[in-house]
Image (tube, rainbow, N blue to C red):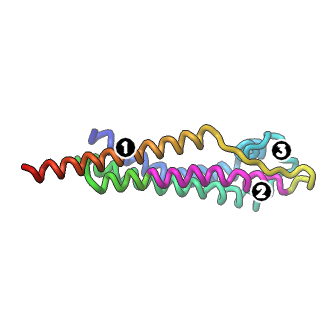
């Protein structure tokens, strides 16, 4: 468990460092059709080439849920470092797991909320009758919320186990 936790802490660190770079790179180089799909539109929804300001704004909007997720991954990293040090059933682990779950929940909600902004942004230069506003919730959003809820419940189980262990130790 300690070796795996150390590996996971490094993986979280790598994601925190490289994921924002990948998002910005994606927005710089991706085809407009791919960006349209990201905004819950058909690939041919963008009728004119995207301008640089649209790509910059799209990257910034997309970074909002990414940054929230990265904050959660930073909490997970700290938790895994504790596990790697053999500190498993601690109040800090519970707090970090709950914090991770909260940040992932916030990221999932933000991911849902940015879709309309992205759809308007990338079709902004289309003719007035060809602009789009898309709304959508995908399975990735639902699975993220489910995962965050599961982590929150696991943290609560650890907290209850801690409380029982403390109560039992006071009897001895």
Q: Earlier in the sequence, mark 1 or mark 2?
A: 2
How far apart are labels 1 and 3 at the CA level?
43 Å
The rendered magenta stretch, by its main secondary structure, is classed as helix
Q: Which residue is mark 2?
A: 121
Q: Nearer the viewer, residue 58 or 168?
A: 168
Quick check: can you spot residue 17? no
Left or right: 99 as drawn, with respect to 120:
left
Q: Which residue is mark 3?
A: 45
Q: Position of residue 136 (x, y in %)?
A: 70, 44
Q: Earlier in the sequence, mark 1 or mark 3?
A: 3
Find out whether residue 115 is within the magenta segment: yes
> In the image, which disc is placed on residue 19?
none
How far apart are labels 2 and 3 at the CA level?
12 Å
Local packing at callout 1 (Cα closer than 10 Å; few below 14, some 14-19, many 20+) is some
Quick check: can you spot residue 40? yes
Q: Which residue is mark 1?
A: 154
Which residue corresponds to the image point at 86% horizontal and 56% vertical from the top-left? 125
* Label 1 SS: helix
Q: Earlier in the sequence, mark 2 or mark 3?
A: 3
Q: Which residues are magenta?
A: 101-124
Instruction: Tell me the mark number nearer the camera, choosing from 1 and 2.
Output: 1
């Amino acid at each position: 468990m300690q070796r795996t936790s150390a590996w996971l802490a490094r993986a979280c660190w790598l994601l925190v460092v490289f994921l924002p770079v990948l998002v910005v790179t994606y927005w710089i180089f991706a085809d407009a059709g791919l960006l349209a799909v990201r905004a819950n539109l058909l690939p041919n929804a963008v009728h004119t080439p995207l301008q640089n300001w649209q790509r910059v704004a799209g990257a910034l909007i997309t970074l909002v849920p990414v940054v929230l997720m990265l904050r959660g991954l930073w909490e997970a990293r700290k938790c895994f470092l504790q596990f790697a040090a053999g500190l498993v059933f601690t109040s800090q682990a519970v707090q970090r797991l709950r914090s991770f779950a909260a940040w992932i929940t916030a990221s999932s909600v933000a991911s849902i909320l940015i879709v309309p902004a992205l759809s308007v942004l990338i079709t902004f230069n289309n003719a007035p009758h060809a602009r789009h506003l898309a709304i959508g919730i995908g399975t990735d959003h639902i699975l993220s919320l489910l995962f965050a809820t599961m982590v929150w419940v696991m943290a609560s189980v650890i907290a209850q186990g801690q409380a029982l262990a403390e109560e039992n130790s006071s009897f001895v």
